[in-house]
Image: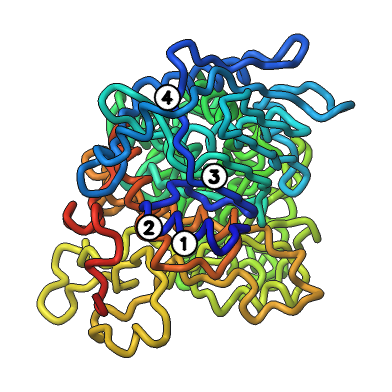
């Protein structure tokens, strides 16, 4: 953050800079500025895309309806006199840089990872002259609008800031800033997914990783393979139709979020046996390879993203060793299980590549198995953060999602019914908090609280300088053995916002300034209908720093 010393002191005395994620460069003042009753947002683009116009409409609705009081004692009462005397801002002007192509937010969002342009500049003068957002893409303008909407508070019916002038130059440190939702263990209605996409967009996340199916259920209706959902969903009402998929994908794209679908293979497919027992238990049987190719290709055609995950984790080798059909097939072909897996992977990846998709896989496909993968394959690291370096050493692009930092389901106890007493903790305990705990503070933290925190995460730990370009970013993940629509919001938000900042701003954030900003984000999310969990008693939220260990 680029803030002069005097301005930073003034900001700390007044309260909290509310922006999340923190911009890469930020300059602020100390003047009050209010929105004029006639405030409007003007798009200075000939024939602006409809999804950009919709983003403008949403921003104006936030400015009208957030009605968020500043998180200080009195909730902004002390600002009232200054705001009464303040200049009024009458307009925000949106512009593309000269020569920039005019494309929809959705089209720009679906460009291959690493080629999207999300940068923008934002200037809000203190004298009431028009504010401005400039970018070289509609997607960048959306990111700027997101920042602009977080600047404002409300008191006594007046929307205002006390930090003008404001100048932001911003762009993401990493292109992949994601959230994964498992909709197999428990089903989530489309409305819950849309609300989650809204919250993701407010923290500038770029990728929704949809783990749509697993061993427990297959809720996706796939053209040509509809029997999988009709026999594999929990209930006929718990199915995502092709029109639902289109609805979700369009909703996400308009909010700057690409949707990466995952059909995990060859493991985690037991539910397929409800419709096709001949293909399960073992994925290397020849009929399953043919079936899987067609299934994955059909799913690929449902999603416009340039990337699709075929999974590949937790292959049950013992199952295949005991399965007569698999053993007969291996004997007939003269292959080992690893060789059969290699053939299966090459054929399924060829099927989705034919549909224009780049494959993504879980880390075992690189670190545990000897399979042939294209150099452009994206590897999702989940078992441990320590494994990222080994993936990078094999020259694969990677996405961080390690269970020791980013699993949101950890720490809630065991879900297995007969696991009691000493074995009642979840496998990935402890609970993954958002905080950065410095070495000095960690010495005074109870051992049971010394879990790893997502805000501390360093994306380049043990990655060499020459390998740094392989790191695309990261995601937080929710496996839903113990989650459903009832607790989706509080288990995800605002914790998942911590990784959004790590991968937008870069690592090394400051806890003392991050916590008040995260409070602000959580309060604003609740104003917008997302039930983000409380981080502290409200007394603490209104008095930054007063609830620290050393206060």
Q: Distance between the residues labelled 4 and 3?
A: 21 Å
**Closer to the camera: disc 2 or disc 4?**
2
> In this view of the protein, which residue sits in the foreground, 528 or 66?
66
The relative height of residue 305 versus residue 330 in the rendered view (above or below) is above
- Among numbered discs 2 and 4, the one appearing first in the sequence: 2
Left or right, 148 with reference to 47: left
Residue found at x 68% / y 57%: 378
Taking the view exactly as shown, the residue that stands out farthest to the left is 421
For residue 9, which numbered disc appears in the image? Answer: 1
- Quadrant of the snapshot with the N terminus: bottom right
Residue annotated with mark 2: 13
Q: Distance between the residues labelled 1 and 3?
A: 30 Å
For label 1, count other residues whose C-alpha is less than 10 Å away and answer few (under 14), some (14-19) or many (20+): few
The relative height of residue 134 versus residue 366 in the rendered view (above or below) is above
**Closer to the camera: disc 3 or disc 2?**
2
Mark 1 touches mark 3? (CB < 8 Å): no
- Among numbered discs 1 and 4, the one appearing first in the sequence: 1
Residue annotated with mark 4: 63
**Closer to the camera: disc 1 or disc 3?**
1
For label 4, count other residues whose C-alpha is less than 10 Å away and answer few (under 14), some (14-19) or many (20+): many
Residue found at x 29% / y 60%: 544
Residue annotated with mark 3: 205
């Amino acid at each position: 953050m680029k803030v002069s010393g005097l301005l930073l002191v003034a900001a700390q005395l007044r309260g909290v800079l509310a922006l999340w994620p923190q911009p890469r460069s930020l300059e602020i003042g100390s003047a009050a500025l209010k929105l004029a009753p006639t405030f409007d947002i003007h798009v200075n683009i000939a024939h602006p895309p409809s999804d950009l116009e919709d983003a403008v409409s949403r921003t104006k609705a936030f400015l009208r309806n957030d009605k968020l009081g500043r998180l200080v004692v009195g909730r902004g009462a002390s600002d009232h006199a200054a705001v009464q005397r303040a200049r009024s801002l009458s307009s925000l002007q949106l512009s593309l840089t000269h020569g920039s192509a005019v494309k929809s937010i959705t089209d720009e969002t679906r460009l291959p990872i690493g080629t999207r342009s999300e940068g923008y500049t934002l200037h809000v003068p203190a004298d009431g002259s028009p504010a401005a957002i400039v970018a070289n893409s509609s997607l960048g303008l959306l990111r700027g609008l997101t920042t602009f909407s977080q600047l404002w508070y409300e008191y006594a019916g007046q929307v205002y800031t006390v930090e003008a002038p404001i100048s932001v130059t911003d762009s993401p440190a990493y292109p992949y800033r994601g959230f994964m939702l498992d909709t197999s263990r428990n089903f989530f209605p489309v409305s819950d997914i849309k609300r989650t996409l809204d919250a993701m967009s407010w923290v500038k996340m770029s990728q929704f990783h949809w783990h749509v199916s697993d061993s427990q259920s297959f809720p996706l209706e796939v053209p040509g393979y509809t029997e999988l959902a009709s026999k594999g969903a929990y209930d006929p009402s718990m199915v995502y139709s092709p029109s639902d998929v289109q609805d979700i994908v369009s909703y996400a794209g308009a909010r700057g979020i690409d949707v990466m679908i995952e059909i995990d293979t060859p493991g985690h497919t037991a539910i397929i046996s409800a419709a096709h027992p001949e293909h399960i238990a073992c994925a290397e049987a020849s009929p399953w390879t043919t079936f899987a190719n067609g299934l994955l290709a059909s799913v690929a055609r449902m999603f416009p993203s340039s990337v699709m995950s075929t999974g590949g984790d937790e292959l049950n080798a013992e199952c295949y060793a005991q399965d007569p059909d698999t053993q007969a097939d291996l004997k007939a072909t003269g292959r080992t299980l690893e060789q059969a897996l290699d053939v299966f992977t090459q054929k399924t990846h060829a099927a989705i590549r034919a549909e224009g998709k780049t494959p993504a896989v879980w880390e075992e496909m690189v670190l545990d198995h000897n399979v042939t993968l294209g150099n452009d394959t994206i590897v999702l690291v989940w078992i441990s953060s320590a494994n990222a370096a080994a993936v990078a050493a094999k020259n694969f692009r990677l996405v961080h999602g390690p269970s020791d930092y980013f699993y949101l389901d950890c720490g809630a106890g065991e879900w297995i019914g007969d696991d009691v007493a000493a074995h009642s903790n979840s496998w990935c305990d402890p609970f993954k908090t958002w905080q950065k705990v410095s070495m000095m503070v960690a010495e005074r933290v109870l051992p049971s609280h010394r879990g790893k925190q997502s805000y501390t995460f360093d994306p380049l730990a043990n990655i060499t300088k020459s390998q740094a370009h392989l790191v695309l970013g990261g995601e937080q993940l929710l496996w839903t053995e113990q989650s459903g629509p009832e607790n989706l919001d509080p288990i995800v938000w605002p914790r998942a916002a911590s990784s959004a900042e790590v991968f937008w701003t870069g690592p090394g954030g400051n806890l003392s300034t991050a916590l008040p900003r995260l409070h602000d984000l959580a309060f604003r999310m609740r104003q917008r209908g997302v039930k983000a969990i409380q981080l502290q008693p409200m007394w603490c939220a209104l008095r930054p720093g007063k609830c620290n260990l050393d206060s």
